[in-house]
Image (tube, rainbow, N blue to C red):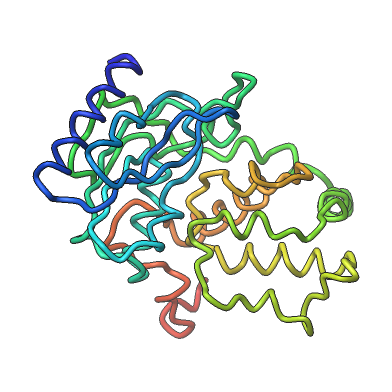
Amino acid sequence: MKEIEIENELRRVVRRLFLEKRIDIFIGFEDSLNGVRPCFIKSVDEVDRLVWNKFCKNNLALYLLRFDCRVGIVAKGCDEGAIIELIKENQISRENLYIIGIPCNGIYSEDNKIYSVCKTCTRRNPLIADIIIGELVDEKDMTFDDLKEIEDMPIKDRFRFWIREFENCILCYACRNICPLCYCNECYLDRRDLIDLRERNLSDKIFFHLSRAIHLAGRCIECGECERACPMNIKLGKLFRKISKEVWELFEYKPGIGIEDKNPLITFDPKRDEEL
């Protein structure tokens, strides 16, 4: 199906959901002066605002925590991966959610370049959607070849690489605030005794990024929102890809696939899993 056909079918399905009173709100995308942006449709009269194209980059799962009602949502593979994790962590209810899944071959920036995370994505087709619009696409095998350049560096050079990246950080917290899995009402990284935003020391920046990386180990679904949101272009995608690789090689676990799958970092038993 062409993008315009997917868009028309999306509107038709959402219109039906409202008419049948199956949803109270729908989370999708609309056109704006700066491109495509998330939108919240509250009635059948607003359905024609919905659009769908290769520039629909935002992970809409971020907004699910705002609503305590019956919600419909359009989801790419990465959106659905975040939805699966939020369901597993008891943050949202599957019963109150209607998922319209759209197979994805990659999302593009405003200058028409495919995002790097899309080149390594292995979650292109919907897994738990209530309805799928569009033809399924070929999935990619999981590889971490994109990390080879950094991993081949001597340890000292690798350390310098990340120090240079973290030095650019202004501790704006955009990466945390855009992450659909960073949902804590009170974040320990806001504590002044841990990180003082007035100083912005390098040690604070390192602590912030490594703490987030560890916190998201086995949970990050590699949607790339953190790197896209970063005003300093820090290579956060590489950092979280490396964490994902370690989790995969240790436990053969990939988050955002099965609702019944358990995060191994939660179920890990030092006595039972002594060899690890």
Give the image location of residue 239, x and y in percent. 67, 51
Which of these two is toward me, 129 or 142?
A: 129
218 shown above or below 71? below
Quarter where residue 179 is shown: bottom right
Which of these two is toward me, 66 or 100?
A: 66
User: How many discs mark residues in the rendered view?
Assistant: 0
Quarter where residue 262 is shown: bottom left
Does 150 sit left or right of 142 as displayed? Answer: right
Give the image location of residue 104, x and y in percent. 39, 29
- Identified at 86% across, 69% down, the residue is 203
Q: State the residue lying farthest toward the front.
A: 45
121 shown above or below 62? above
- Identified at 90% across, 67% down, the residue is 201
Which of these two is toward me, 46 or 270?
A: 46
- Identified at 50% across, 41% down, the residue is 58
The quadrant of the picture occupied by the N terminus is top left
Does 149 sit left or right of 81 as displayed? Answer: right
Give the image location of residue 254, x and y in percent. 42, 53
Give the image location of residue 136, x and y in percent. 27, 26
Does 49 sit left or right of 270 as displayed? Answer: left
- Identified at 25% across, 40% down, the residue is 100
Which of these two is toward me, 241 or 223?
A: 223
251 shown above or below 109? below
Does 229 sit left or right of 152 as displayed? Answer: left
